[in-house]
Amino acid sequence: MVEKREEIIKVLSDCTEGQQMIFKRMYSPGNLQLPISDVVDLINEGSLERALDQCERTMIKNYKNKKWLREHNLNKILKNE
């Protein structure tokens, strides 16, 4: 399960602050001030797969967003269109 938690943290590090806040609201609604890594640590094992799926879908959405790609210096992906 450690691998899934590490993967979630890795994906979330590339998400916007707003996207991270949505994640916090979903998985730690009572403590939105926690660092994102602490929120991930609080997720029960039965919800890790769902959380990882949600993060991956968010990243796919981000990759389709040209503005996000530019902000993250991923213009090489834009050139491949």
Image: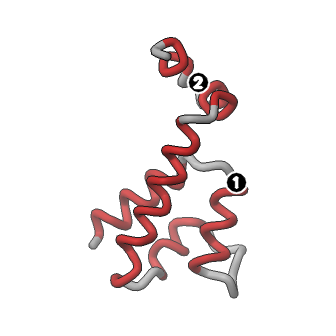
How is the structure coloured here? Answer: secondary structure
Q: From what the image shows, is residue 58 above or below residue 49?
A: above
The percent position of residue 4, horizontal first and vertical second, equals: 32, 65
Distance from the alpha carbon under mark 1 to that under mark 2: 17 Å
Residue at (46%, 59%) from the top-left corner?
9
Q: Is residue 16 above or below residue 32?
A: above
Q: Which residue is mark 1?
A: 17
The secondary structure type at the circle numbered 2 is: loop
Q: Residue furthest front?
A: 81
Position of residue 34 in the picture relative to residue 74 (left or right): right
- Sort mark 1 into few (<14), some (14-19) or many (20+) by Cα contacts within 10 Å: few
- Percent position of residue 46, x then y: 35, 84
Q: Position of residue 2 (x, y in %)?
A: 29, 69
Disc number at residue 73?
2
Residue at the spot 48% in from the left edge and 62% down from the top edge: 54
The extreme top residue here reads 79
Q: Considering only order in the chain, which callout, 2 or 1, is on the residue closer to the N terminus?
A: 1
- Give the structural element (helix, strand or loop) at label 1: helix
Between 75 and 32, the residue placed more toward the observer is 75
Identify the residue at image location x=69%, y=30%: 67
Label of residue 7 in the image: none
Residue type of the residue flagged with mark 2: Asn
The residue drawn where x is 46% and y is 15% is 80
Residue 73 lies left or right of residue 67; in this view the side is left
**Badge 2: how crowded within 10 Å, few (<14), some, or many (20+)?**
few
Which amino acid type is marked by label 1?
Answer: Glu
Q: Quadrant of the N terminus?
A: bottom left
